[in-house]
Structure formats: C-alpha cells, structure tokens
Image (spheres, helix red, strand yellow):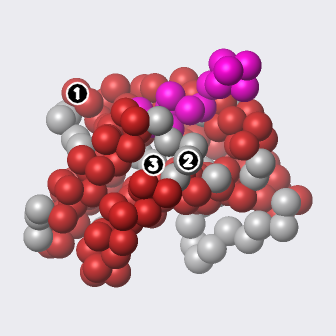
C-alpha cells in the first residue's frame, strides 16, 4: 500500500532529496485511493509544513524530537522494553519475519524502526498490513500522544498510522 511507503518517507530524517520531492509527493496524494479526506488533508498539511521551513531547521527538529527524547523513539520495541535484554529477541523475531518475506533490512537500521516497519507494511497485502501493524497499535497510540503533548507536527503522521493499525478496519 502506497500510503505506508509515503509515511515511511515522511518519517525519515529530512534531507535535500526529500525537500526536492515535496511538490511531487503533494501531487501524488490525489492519486492515493486508499486515503480518506482527513488523512489526505493531514498529509498535505505536513508536507506544507516541511516545505515552509529551511532544511537545517527541519533536521534540528527531527533530531530533537526523535533522537533526544526516548518517549518519542521511532524504535517500537524501545517503548515496550527500553534497553532491557528482552528487546533483543523481539528484534531478532522481526528481522526473521522480514527475511521470511524476502525483505532485507537496509544498512544498520534495527528492524523495529518505524519507517522500516512501514516499508514492510507497504510490501504486504492490505489485510496483512493491517494485521501486522495492529500488533503495534498501543505503542503507536502512546507515541502519538507523546508527540502531541510536545506539539510535534510528526504526531499527525503517527496518528494516521495508529488509526489504520486496528483490526476494526478489517471489518469495515
């Protein structure tokens, strides 16, 4: 599902390539049939936010938001285990699941890194993606709430994911 790939891109560390592609991303939103009007508006708002700020400012905000505040971590198992030794087996299980689907984890990123999780979800069929993401629903809820409390614009993106990461969407 393309929406998960787009969300993955928007949750990555902002760079010049992202900035150059913002107009294209904005145009492509109209082509995404799996978005509802609220999601489309939220994504357009977020893209406008990115476009309105200098890259260095966006990068500083990203680091301050995600790298300096543990409660905003994009590493999902961190919210469950912190730095506890039980986090390792969960990461191994996620990595093995990706390999079972023929998906390789890129670079040195941990398999629970939300943009990577979203890329994997984009690879799946819609029902599979909903089931896969539903396992992280409570974490996504807490993360969105933490980001909302700090006034981060990234909260809106996490809220979209959290809203989709529910088995109730399967029934709909």
Say which residue label 1 marks: 149
Secondary structure state at the residue bearing disc 1: helix
| Rendering coords of residue 144 (x, y %) | 37, 32
Which region of the structure is painted magenta?
Answer: 159-172
Mark earlier in primary sequence (3, 2): 2
**Which is nearer the eye, 156 or 149?**
156
Q: Check if residue 168 falls in the magenta segment.
A: yes
Count neighbours of disc 3 (C-alpha within 10 A) and say few if under 14, some if 14 to 19, many if 20 or more.
Answer: many
For the point 42% across and 56% down, which residue is it? 29
| Residue 74 falls left or right of residue 164 | left
Q: Nearer the viewer, mark 2 or mark 1?
A: 2
Task: Give me the C-alpha separation between circle 1 and circle 3.
Answer: 16 Å
Q: Is residue 11 above or below residue 169?
A: below
Say which residue label 3 marks: 74
Say which residue label 2 marks: 33
Count neighbours of disc 1 (C-alpha within 10 A) and say few if under 14, some if 14 to 19, many if 20 or more.
Answer: few
**Which is nearer the eye, 85 or 76?**
76
| Residue 23 visible to the viewer | yes
């Amino acid at each position: 599902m393309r929406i998960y790939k787009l969300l993955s891109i928007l949750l990555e560390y902002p760079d010049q390539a992202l900035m150059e592609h913002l107009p294209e991303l904005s145009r492509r939103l109209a082509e995404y049939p799996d978005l509802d009007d609220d999601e489309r508006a939220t994504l357009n708002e977020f893209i406008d936010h990115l476009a309105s700020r200098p890259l260095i400012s966006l990068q500083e905000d990203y680091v301050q938001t995600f790298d300096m505040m543990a409660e905003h971590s994009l590493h999902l198992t961190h919210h469950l285990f912190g730095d506890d030794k039980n986090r390792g087996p969960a990461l191994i299980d996620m990595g093995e699941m990706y390999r079972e689907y023929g998906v390789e984890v890129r670079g040195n990123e941990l398999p629970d890194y939300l943009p990577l999780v979203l890329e994997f979800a984009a690879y799946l069929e819609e029902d599979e993606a909903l089931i896969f993401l539903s396992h992280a629903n409570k974490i996504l809820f807490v993360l969105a709430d933490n980001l909302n409390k700090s006034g981060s614009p990234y909260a809106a993106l996490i809220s979209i994911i959290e809203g989709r990461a529910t088995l109730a969407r399967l029934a709909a």
